[in-house]
Amino acid sequence: MDVLQGTVLFRGMAETEIREALDSLGAFQRSYSKGEAVLHAGSTTRRIGLVLSGSVTVESNDMWGNRTVLDVIGRGEFFAETYAFLRNEPLLVDVAANEDSRVLFLEIGSLAESAAARPWQVKLLGNLLTITAHKNLALSGRAFHTAPKTARGRILAYLNSVSVKKHAKEFDIPFDRQQMADYLSLERTALSKELGRMRREGIIAFRKNRFTIL
């Protein structure tokens, strides 16, 4: 329950309201192994997913084998909320476990069919609007990060935005190197070479997914 109360979806809700919401929305949990598919492109869903432990990636995989990482969803964060509301709209993305993970599913598609809104429903819908707004900002951010034509421009745009968001020049990013390359629409070798050059030039320092802007 502590995990749920700390999430945006249940913000401002008492424990009794959260329990009522879980019962009404048919909540259930499922565990996934690293790399296991959670949702497939082309399928539909009425359920929103809340990551209770681990993390999942939201990615676009085309028929030619190209993979683009759109987001990494960590503990306490949600995915598929837009598709859950639209219900019959096929997913354009895949969701896969980034590591061994546990996910709570809630059938929020049913909220659109409720004739009379109870207090917890009003709060939940308001919180869902906040989540959707943040997701739109994240997608806009990715467009900004991939706009520069050079690898260095994309790397700097991304690292700068993370630094601004975290109010720090030293921070962790949620991606490994391959995921970072996919997110920035770069070849991994090109990303690694450019990161190496930037480190030698004293622009950045890094170790695994921890970066410092110098």
Image: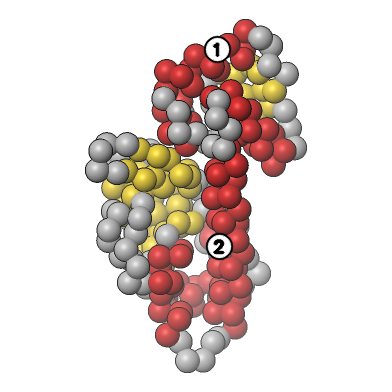
Q: Is residue 120 visible?
A: no
Does residue 183 sit above or below 210 in this rendering?
A: below
Residue, far front: 149
**Which residue does the image show at 63% across and 33% down from the upper left?**
157
Q: Is 70 on the left-hand or right-hand side of 63?
A: right
Q: Secondary structure at mark 1?
A: helix
Image quarter of the C terminus: top right
Q: Secondary structure at mark 2?
A: helix
Mark 2, Cα crowd under 10 Å, few <14 / some 14-19 / many 20+, is some
Q: What is the x, y in percent for residue 148?
A: 58, 33
CB under 8 Å between callouts 2 and 1?
A: no
Q: What is the x, y in percent for residue 133?
A: 60, 61
Mark 2, residue position: 132
Q: What is the x, y in percent for residue 198?
A: 61, 15
* Residue 125 picture quarter: bottom right
Does residue 180 sit above or below 19 in this rendering?
A: above
Q: Amino acid at mark 1?
A: Gly
- What colouring style does the render use? secondary structure
Mark 1, residue position: 196
* Residue 118 picture quarter: bottom right
**Which residue does the image show at 42% across and 85% down from the upper left?**
113
**Which residue does the image show at 62% across and 12% down from the upper left?**
199
Q: Earlier in the sequence, mark 2 or mark 1?
A: 2
Mark 1, Cα crowd under 10 Å, few <14 / some 14-19 / many 20+, is some
